[in-house]
Image (spheres, rainbow, N blue to C red):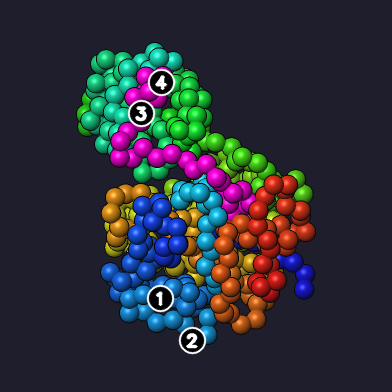
């Protein structure tokens, strides 16, 4: 059989399916993102995920497994030392991360980091806590404008964010301070995945609005990935949603910014209707950002239902020589304590119209089987130093 002409990898950001054996080392006991959502909501309207085999792979609540699933499905364990978005996506494409990215959700950034940032930027830092970006601007925007201070904050992710009023801070100065922060946080103990400039306008509470001049300063992958190999071979590598940011543009030939996960699926459906040869790599972040971190079980469940509707459209649009892979990058159990990601197994569901019958496949111990299988399909060698072995033959 000839290889697939197009592969779609869709990451349902944070849709984990149960704790890994080492989850307690990450502070996660008994976590299960998808399972606990099903237990609490009892049923979800997800006929397409159901027929692909999601409930055969992981059952909970009152929902039944499909008697004749059309997809091939398995669990993937994470080999890397972490439970964040960048680590998970990088591993999918062959990079094993040993030094985890740091989060400062509960404590804010260390005094030594703040002191160095203040010294090099020439501005006093205010905030230094985990917060919603819009809320912290409402809280501290007037103080920043009146005193010339600098709002610094974080979230449940590995990120350092700096707010700056475009009229009083100056946009280029904000970018300069973020570049300084990026350099400072290269230190292992302070290593965050992204530094983000968050500009806003307005003069007082109730008038503040963030602008579109946001700029992300992400870390580049620590080595070449499957994406680089595909691009170098002349194949299309289309990123949808956060993919460009996660890989700092490395190995991407075309990118689509998504306003929401629903929008991301609409873009993917439109891309599917176009001609290309290679990979369409999609991240759907709302599961994680809107519902997981906010510990909103019902919102998460409804988001899965929205996804399933567009999944049905995509399944109809797939061509005979397309391969669809659905997966996740970590967990974020909305029923668990705190606001952090959770260390979990993730699903991998494969479907192609030319497949024979569906069924369960053997569990794999790394997300990197995804990238290795994609490279194998397109007859491209994986870059030196990457991990993962192809399981492509099991998708035929």
Q: State the residue position of label 4.
A: 117
Q: Is mark 2 on a helix, strand or loop?
A: loop
Which residue is more in the foreground, 345 or 203?
345
Which residue is more in the foreground, 255 or 191?
191
Q: Does the magenta stretch include residue 109?
A: yes
Query: Looking at the picture, how far across and down is residue 74, in whole percent?
Result: 54, 70
Q: In this view, does 172 lie above or below 45?
A: above
Instruction: Say whether disc 1 or disc 3 marks the residue closer to the N-terminus.
Output: 1
Instruction: Say whether disc 2 or disc 1 marks the residue closer to the N-terminus.
Output: 1
Q: Is residue 334 above or below residue 363?
A: above
Magenta residues, start to end: 89-117
Instruction: Say whether disc 3 or disc 4 marks the residue closer to the N-terminus.
Output: 3
Q: State the residue position of label 3.
A: 110
Instruction: Say whether disc 2 or disc 3 marks the residue closer to the N-terminus.
Output: 2
Q: State the residue position of label 1.
A: 59
Q: Is residue 107 magenta?
A: yes
Q: Which tag is nearer the camera, tag 4 or tag 2?
A: 4
Q: Which disc number belongs to residue 67?
A: 2
Q: Which tag is nearer the camera, tag 2 or tag 3?
A: 3
């Amino acid at each position: 059989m000839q290889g697939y002409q197009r592969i779609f990898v869709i990451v349902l950001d944070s849709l984990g399916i149960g704790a890994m054996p080492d989850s307690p080392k990450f502070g996660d006991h008994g976590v299960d993102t998808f399972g606990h959502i099903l237990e609490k909501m009892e049923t979800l309207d997800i006929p397409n995920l159901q027929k692909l085999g999601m409930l055969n792979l992981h059952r909970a609540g009152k929902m039944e497994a499909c008697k004749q699933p059309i997809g091939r499905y398995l669990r993937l364990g994470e080999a890397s030392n972490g439970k964040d978005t960048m680590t998970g996506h990088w591993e999918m494409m062959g990079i094993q991360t040993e030094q985890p990215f740091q989060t400062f959700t509960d404590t804010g950034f260390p005094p030594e980091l703040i002191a160095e940032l203040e010294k090099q930027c020439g501005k006093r830092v205010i905030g230094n806590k985990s917060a919603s970006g819009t809320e912290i601007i409402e809280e501290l925007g007037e103080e920043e404008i009146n005193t010339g201070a600098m709002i610094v904050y974080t979230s449940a992710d590995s990120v350092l964010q700096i707010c700056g009023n475009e009229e009083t801070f100056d946009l280029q100065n904000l970018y300069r301070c973020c570049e300084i922060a990026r350099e400072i946080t290269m230190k292992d103990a302070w290593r965050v995945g992204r530094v983000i400039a968050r500009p806003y306008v307005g003069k007082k509470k109730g008038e503040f609005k963030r602008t579109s001049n946001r700029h992300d300063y992400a870390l580049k992958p620590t080595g070449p990935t499957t994406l680089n190999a595909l691009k170098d071979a002349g194949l299309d590598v289309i990123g949808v949603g956060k993919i460009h940011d996660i890989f700092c543009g490395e190995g991407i030939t075309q990118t689509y910014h998504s306003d929401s996960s629903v929008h991301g699926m609409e873009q993917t459906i439109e891309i599917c209707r176009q001609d290309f040869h290679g990979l369409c790599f999609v991240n759907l972040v709302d599961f994680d950002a809107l519902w997981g971190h906010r510990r909103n079980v019902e919102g998460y469940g409804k988001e899965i239902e929205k996804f399933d509707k567009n999944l049905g459209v995509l399944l109809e649009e797939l061509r005979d020589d397309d391969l669809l892979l659905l997966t996740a990058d970590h967990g974020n159990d909305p029923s668990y304590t705190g606001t952090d990601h959770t260390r979990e197994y993730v699903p991998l569901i494969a479907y192609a119209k030319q497949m024979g019958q569906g069924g369960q496949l053997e569990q794999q111990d790394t997300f990197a089987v995804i990238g290795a299988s994609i490279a194998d399909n397109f007859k491209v060698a994986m870059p030196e130093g990457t991990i993962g072995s192809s399981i492509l033959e099991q998708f035929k």
